[in-house]
Image: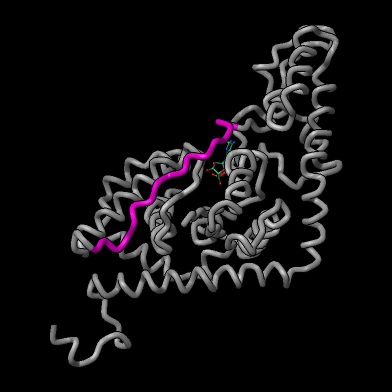
């Protein structure tokens, strides 16, 4: 079972697309997968009702528009399967604080200006629950997320060792599926593209708004006639993501020989973005007129996922001794 979360904490951008989403779409029809929109995670950095609601539904629209087929894999909202937070609590009681203190992702996010709340600190625990509550075995992630999957693997082992006999472990130990993604997609200011930096180009930006962003990509100040270095240029770094080999080589050559300005490169990039996402934009416009269909997709996805999660949680409550009045009889309490 392949499982992966997508955070609805902002508008999805080209960094997310080339770093993760494109690979999710490629994978979802080869392996039966659960893709969930992690709105509990988004609450660690977003306390705005209207924004959280609209970003959550936007992620669903974006994935469906980009080619996610809900007949082949499931797409659903994390909050439709609340068992995940129950499991996260149980995992929290097994997780050493020192392990969380070493998490690089937490330090990075705080350095980017996010508030260091306990939810952000314990994020890897909820992530472990996200994966293990469905018995996930394979987790597609960018290289930046590898450490969090290590925490999930440790958590699964620790739970099994603590509560299960050696021959009947409850949780499989999942493996990361490190995505063959580009290392870092630069934003329009040349830093890593990230919603925290306000330097993103949205996947579904178009028209004047898209043009303004592309034309605003930071370059050096070399004049039209001067030879330029494609490898240190932010515009070329983005062109490389879209262009086929021949186009990429032609443009690199034009950079080196001079007579080709950054304005030319930006125009070519704009055309490539329009071509690449043209059909997806059409589909997204259509989907936006059918919100009931989108909700149905999410509801159906959650149904299957919820059943699977409850099966795991039933066993988890049993082996940990978490009785509920619905699960015990006077006879069974004597043991
Ligand atoms: P943001 O930095 O905008 O908050 P996220 O942390 O939500 O983005 O990113 C989700 C995933 O998208 C990351 O795990 C990574 O795989 C991918 N990703 C995000 N930004 C980039 C980028 N600039 N370059 C490459 N991949 C990225």
Instruction: Choose between 289 and 170: the one closer to the eye.
Output: 170
Q: Is residue 76 left or right of residue 177?
A: right
Task: Look at the image and tell me whether residue 99 can be seen.
Answer: yes
**Where residue 58 appears, x then y in whole percent?**
68, 58
Residue that appears at 57% across and 51% down: 30
**Where residue 86 appears, x then y in whole percent?**
38, 69
Instruction: Choose between 160 and 39: the one closer to the eye.
Output: 160
The residue furthest bottom is 330
- Range of the magenta residues? 168-184
For the image shown, how many numbered marks are present on the structure? 0
In the figure, 211 relative to 203: above or below? above
Q: Is residue 170 magenta?
A: yes
Q: Is residue 73 left or right of residue 211?
A: left
Residue that appears at 24% across and 71% down: 319
Task: Look at the image and tell me whether residue 117 can be seen.
Answer: no
In the figure, 202 relative to 171: above or below? above
In which image quadrant can residue 314 be found? bottom left
Q: Quadrant of ligand 1?
A: top right
**Where residue 237 appears, x then y in whole percent?**
67, 25
Q: Quadrant of the C terminus?
A: bottom left
Residue that appears at 77% across and 30% down: 216
């Amino acid at each position: 079972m392949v499982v992966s979360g997508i955070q609805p904490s902002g508008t999805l951008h080209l960094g997310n697309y080339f770093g993760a989403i494109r690979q999710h779409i490629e994978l979802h029809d080869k392996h039966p997968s659960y893709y969930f929109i992690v709105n509990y995670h988004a609450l660690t950095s977003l306390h705005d009702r209207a924004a959280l609601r609209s970003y959550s539904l936007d992620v669903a629209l974006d994935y469906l528009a980009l080619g996610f087929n809900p007949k082949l894999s499931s797409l659903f909202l994390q909050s439709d399967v609340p068992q995940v937070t129950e499991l996260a609590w149980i995992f929290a009681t097994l997780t050493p604080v020192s392990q969380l203190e070493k998490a690089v992702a937490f330090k990075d996010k705080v350095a980017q200006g996010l508030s260091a709340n306990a939810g952000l600190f314990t994020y890897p625990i909820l992530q472990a629950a996200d994966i293990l509550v469905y018995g996930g075995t394979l987790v597609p992630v960018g290289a930046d997320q590898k450490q969090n999957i290590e925490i999930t693997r440790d958590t699964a082992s620790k739970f099994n060792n603590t509560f299960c006999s050696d021959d009947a472990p409850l949780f499989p130990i999942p493996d990361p599926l490190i995505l063959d993604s580009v290392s870092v997609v630069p934003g329009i200011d040349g830093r890593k593209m990230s919603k925290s930096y306000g330097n993103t180009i949205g996947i579904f930006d178009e028209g004047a708004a898209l043009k303004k962003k592309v034309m605003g990509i930071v370059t050096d100040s070399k004049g039209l006639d001067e030879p330029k270095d494609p490898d240190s240029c932010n515009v070329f770094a983005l062109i490389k993501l879209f262009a086929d080999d021949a186009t990429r080589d032609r443009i690199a050559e034009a950079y080196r020989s001079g007579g080709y300005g950054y304005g030319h490169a930006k125009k070519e990039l704009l055309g490539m973005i329009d071509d690449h996402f043209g059909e997806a934009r059409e589909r997204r416009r259509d989907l936006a007129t059918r919100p009931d269909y989108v909700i149905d997709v999410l509801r159906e996805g959650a149904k299957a996922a919820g059943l699977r999660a409850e099966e795991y949680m039933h066993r988890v409550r049993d082996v940990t001794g978490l009785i509920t009045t619905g699960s015990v009889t006077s006879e069974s309490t004597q043991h």
